[in-house]
Amino acid sequence: MGKVTGFMEIDRQLAKYQPASDRIRHFREFTIPMSDPEVQKQAARCMDCGIPYCHGPTGCPVHNQIPDWNDLVYNGNWDEAIRNLHSTNNFPEFTGRICPAPCEEACTLNLEDAPVAIKTVEQAIADKAYEMGYIVPQPAVVKTGKKVAIIGSGPAGMAAAQQLARAGHEVHVFERESKPGGLLRYGIPDFKMEKNFIDRRVDQMRGEGVTFHCGVNVGVDRTVESLMADHDAVLYCGGSETPRDAGIPGVDLAGVHDAMPYLVQQNRRVGRENIDSVGWPSDPILAGGKHVVVVGGGDTASDCVGTAFRQGAVKVTQLDIRPMPPEKEDKLAVWPFWATKMRTSSSQAEGAVREFQVATLEFVGEDGMLTGVKCCQVDERRKPIAGTEFVIKADLAFIAIGFSGPFTDSVLKDLGDKLKINTDRRGSTNVVANDKDYRTSVDKLWVAGDVRRGQSLVVWAIREGRQAARAIDEALMGSTVLPR
């Protein structure tokens, strides 16, 4: 906790943004950091809760000890604050920027719609730690002689790699793309998180003995069997990248795209890389001077909105089949869980037109080119309402309705053809493993992150990577000191 009476004396404040008219002119982060005294005042608002839901399974998947580091920040002990934060979360500079903060939803003060600014404080701790030089490599003192291969360098793979390296194992991370980071680097726009933070962590991990092998598409360039032959354990941490089939007529028109290729291309441009990417279309997708329609109401759709504005789109319309949510939730019915209520992302606030309770019937076009999106209103069962059809002008449309699982043409194909691994039977391609030991049906193979649980938050990926690392360390050594 912070100051005993802080929540009564200090109003909730968040970091401000650059004006939309300024921030859409670049792809950099646009949050204006708060000063240290301002952050300390926000940390002081943490109450002396009897049962702080913020850091339990309800509020934080990695179980951040939020009241503890709020108190440390309030008292100016930044060094101890980052040590405490790192004890549960390997990458607070990631989650402090891109986590939707279920901890704030679970905060006791959210009963009064004024939760502690937990996410802001978390980011401030991580940024202060870099500024003060607190984040340095922590190589293991004693090596175990065991080798572990990790497939995928997203948040789950990175978290597992760091934990295993610190336990003394020789860790090799195999990444399909040209740089580490997975969907953290290539799926999340730079205006939400600049990639120098990933580079810093990679440098730290290399200093701890982790070896990154980029440009290696496991299952194509190298078999999983060869990895298992050369290593004592293999952990598969693939991302959920296969787009859900929208089943909308007209998807073959020029100008209609899945969301992820668009985001990956722009992230590669910002990173000064060639836009060609394994598994994604390589034809340039640009929104400059176009009318854009985004189908979907989640974070990926919002990222498409913000990217389109920065590329110079004339108009961006976002379609959501769900009804418009209420402005305020019923606290007694849903707290401390994540509430369905009206939320406006920074990208949507840049000028998007939002249509709720609308279904996409068809992409229409002329001579093979997209010209519009035919829509209609739907009832509470998401059934079309006759006579409500309308067409939105569109030169470019993105489908952002989620992902069904990892790519099936590399690792999964290799595993399925040769090792007969068990995958989910509910229509996805997720690999079956429990959340206790993360073992698959194949000996020496573990799995964690989106490839196991399905598309989810970065903070859940970090949790799974950490827990899988503990399970592997225990399996290899007979015991473990890694936290769960």
Image (cartoon, rainbow, N blue to C red):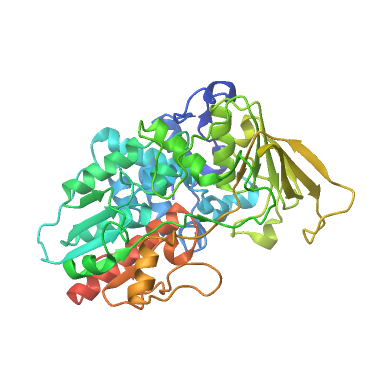
Residue 436 place in picture, x, y as percent: 38, 74
Q: Is residue 379 above or below residue 474?
A: above
* Residue nearest the viewer, comparing 357 with 291: 291
The quarter of the rendered structure image containing the C terminus is bottom left
Which residue sits at x=55%, y=45%?
259
Q: Is residue 453 visible?
A: yes
Q: Is residue 70 visible?
A: no
* Residue nearest the viewer, comparing 73 with 142: 142
Is 225 positioned to the left or the right of 417 in the image?
A: left
Q: Residue 121 falls in which quadrant of the image?
A: top left
* Residue nearest the viewer, comparing 122 with 428: 428
Residue 276 place in picture, x, y as percent: 40, 40
* Residue nearest the viewer, comparing 389 with 454: 389
Is 78 positioned to the left or the right of 330 in the image?
A: left
Residue 409 place in picture, x, y as percent: 41, 60
Which residue sits at x=38%, y=63%?
464
Which residue sits at x=64%, y=43%?
253
Q: From this viewpoint, which residue is outermost toward the right?
A: 387
Residue 389 place in picture, x, y as percent: 84, 46
